[in-house]
Structure formats: structure tokens, C-alpha cells
Image: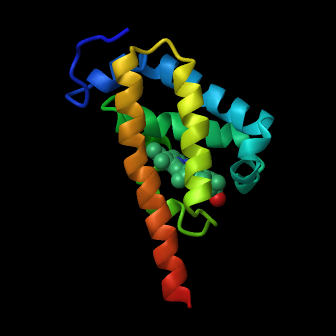
Amino acid sequence: MNSGQQYGIGDSSFQAAGGELGIFQLVNNFFDRMQSDERFSTIWHMHPDDKDMSRDKLARFLCGWLGGPRLYNEKYGAIGIPRVHAHLAIETAERDQWLTCMSESVAEQAFADDFKTYLMEQLFVPAEAVRRRVAMSRESAE
Ligand code: HEM
């Protein structure tokens, strides 16, 4: 169902995602799926052993990124998304594993359909920025 709402203004996206609780649920679904589905094993194994910390970091980041409270910064400090991924082996295939895993998790949430579409369009932007940053770091290391 569409909500007819405009997203990206104030905390409208944060609210549309069900606030802190909704975002933590999404991120838990995302990591559970990444762990259990072979299609996502490359990106699963890239993560450090402490997956609870990874869940906490991504969920807190998304709260602020969607216009809600800046929970990541409060706990972990400043962050640049491309920079924190620069050391990883992320090419198009890994970017798409991440986006597919996320999109299947988003699909299972009780979000309005137009928000699901909007959210995945928005997430493509930092995911692609990560891929480009990794490619750049590799070029300069050659
Ligand atoms: C392009 C595909 C992506 C892959 C394969 C990926 C994978 C990873 C991995 C493996 C880590 C752990 C890094 C480490 O501790 O060594 C990580 C951290 C993180 N990722 Fe991603 N990621 C992707 C895209 C994104 C996007 C689009 C976002 C945000 C919208 C994001 C948010 C984060 C955050 C907040 C952290 C924690 C950073 C920290 O504090 O250490 N990632 N990611």
C-alpha cells in the first residue's frame, strides 16, 4: 500500500521505517538473511566476528541517515561510509549482494510500498559510492 507521503523531509523517512524499533528489526532481518543464505556468504564473511556490533552500527547509522536521532555518532563518533569500506574487496557483485540482501529484508517489513521503493533507490547511492571508493583505492595502490 502507498502512503502518499513525501520522504526525505525532516524525520519522515525515519518515521516511515517505524522509528528506532523498525530500523533495528530491518537490520536484524538483514543480518539473519546474510548469515543463512549462501548467495550472501561473501559479504557475510567480510564482516568481523562480532556481528552484534555490526548490527548495532548499521542500525544506528540508518536512524540518523533517515533523518532520525544520530545514534551512530553518539556512540561511535563521526563516520564516512565510503571511507570505512575502502579496505574491503567490494566490486559490483558484492555491492549487489548487499543491495539484494537489503531489498529482500525491506520487502518483509511493514513499510508502505512507496517507502520500500524510495528506500532502496536511496540506498543504491551510498552502495555505489562504496564500490567506486574501493575501485579508486585499488587504482592508487597499483
Ligand atoms: C556496497 C555494499 C556493502 C558491503 C559489501 C558492506 C560490507 C560491510 C562490511 C564487511 C563491514 C564491516 C567492516 C569492518 O569492520 O571491517 C561494513 C561496515 C559498515 N557498513 Fe557496510 N557494506 C556495504 C554498504 C553499506 C551501505 C550502503 C551502508 C549505509 C547505508 C553501510 C553501512 C555500514 C556501517 C555503518 C558499517 C560500520 C562501520 C564501522 O563503524 O566500522 N554499508 N560494511
Q: Quadrant of the N terminus?
A: top left
Q: Residue at x 38, y 28 (%)?
A: 117
Whole-percent x and y of residue 121?
A: 37, 38
Q: Nearer the viewer, residue 105 or 28?
A: 105
User: In this rendering, would 114 be left or right of 91?
Assistant: left
Outermost residue, bottom direction? 142
Q: Residue at x 46, y 52 (%)?
A: 127
Whole-percent x and y of residue 29?
A: 64, 26
The answer to whether 42 is drawn above or below residue 110 in the figure is: below
Q: Name the image quarter holding residue 81.
A: bottom left
Q: Quadrant of the C terminus?
A: bottom right
Q: Residue at x 54, y 80 (%)?
A: 138
Work out whether residue 71 can be spotted.
Answer: no
The answer to whether 84 is drawn above or below residue 54 in the figure is: below
Query: Total number of numbered labels?
Result: 0
User: In this rendering, would 60 be left or right of 28?
Assistant: left
Q: Residue at x 46, y 77 (%)?
A: 136
The answer to whether 24 is drawn above or below residue 62 in the figure is: above
Whole-percent x and y of residue 141?
A: 55, 87
The chosen color scheme is: rainbow
Whole-percent x and y of residue 133?
A: 45, 68
Q: Nearer the viewer, residue 73 or 55?
A: 55
Q: Nearer the viewer, residue 45 or 100?
A: 100
Work out whether residue 109 can be spotted.
Answer: yes
The answer to whether 127 is drawn above or below residue 58 in the figure is: below
Q: Name the image quarter holding residue 5.
A: top left
